Image (cartoon, helix red, strand yellow):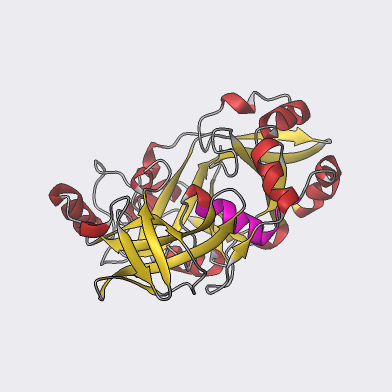
Amino acid sequence: MTSAPHSLAEAHPEAYQAARDGVVRYDASACGRLRMLGRDRAELLHRLSTNDVRSLTAGMGLRTVLTNHNARIIDLLTVYALPEHLLLVTSPGQGTPIRKLLARNIFFNDKVTIEAITDHTVQWQLYGPQAATLLQKLTGLPVGEWALHHIQATQIAGAGAWVARTLPLGDTSSPAFTIFALQADWLEIAPRFEDLPTLDEATYQVLRIEAGYPAWQHELSLDYIPLETRLRDAVSFTKGCYIGQEIIARMDSRQRLAKQLMRLRLDTPVEVGVKLQLDGKEQGTLTSIAHSPEQGLIGLGYIRTEHAHPGVSLQAGTAHAEVEELPGG
């Protein structure tokens, strides 16, 4: 789900428009998928990540961050509570590393099993204002009324699947959805969606940057801390200890962030990774860039907090970059 670190994402017109005023499908199967079973499955993830995983009951989901001892981001996970297990969704290609990390932290008396299910499952997303209507017609479920990250088992074309509400793209006022299924079941389900426009990777990146969402190897890395990345929804400030908790709690209580993720509007393309400067002094880094059909040349970047304000003018290599607030920020 991430483009090459130095590429300028350009949108495909049909897919871009479908995400804004229709419905579009996106193959997110490159994400890692893990199944956690056993009595202590929630307890393990609770003590290793930033959010209150123990609070989940069947049908609920949330985002949580795995951090190291310096509170740096290892990965951003989406966690779904199913009746007999937890379903974990990692960043693309991170299923195996995350499974190994979790396994290393299982204590001798923990009752936890972690299974890699990426290779025999699929993960498709539906975006756009017509997504809820289509999915409700296929499943009979009131999907448009669901809370974010709610998940439920269903049948589509007679085959089993899990459907979850997810973060929207394109028309961000409309709900979006993820469909999880076994590969064998997807062969039965897929024809119901084959007439939909497919969201290609470049257009996905454009929409992601428009929405201000962080991505693996762009805004999500060991260079950054969850609060700098605006991931407050993925952090519980009332739960007990977890790896990196002391640093995150101190940053929150003191309201002192070294840098913050912001959106940028640029006047000419530059490479991702270029330093953002003010009066010749480094103030941040450009982490993503795209050309939006509606918004022009936009990017995401981390900027020192004292300059992370809308309207601040920075130099990004050969480009002029104006700081903008993140959508919903």
Q: Position of residue 53 (x, y in %)?
A: 39, 44
Give the camera-side residue of 259 and 55.
Answer: 259
Quarter of the image where the C terminus is located: top left
Give the camera-side residue of 5 and 114.
Answer: 5
Q: Is residue 160 above or below residue 250?
A: above
Task: Please tell me whether the stretch drawn in magenta is mainly helix, strand or loop.
Answer: helix
Q: Is residue 244 above or below residue 164?
A: below
Q: Position of residue 247 (x, y in %)?
A: 20, 59
- Please report the bounds of the magenta region as a residue range: 198-209
Q: Position of residue 39 (x, y in %)?
A: 45, 46
Quarter of the image where the N terminus is located: bottom right
Q: Position of residue 168 (x, y in %)?
A: 56, 41
Q: Is residue 165 above or below residue 77?
A: above
Residue 203 located within the stretch drawn in magenta: yes
Q: Is residue 131 left or right of residue 285?
A: right
Residue 275 located within the stretch drawn in magenta: no
Task: Locate residue 203: give its quadrant.
Answer: bottom right
Does residue 109 appear in the picture of this structure? Answer: no
Give the camera-side residue of 168 and 116.
Answer: 168
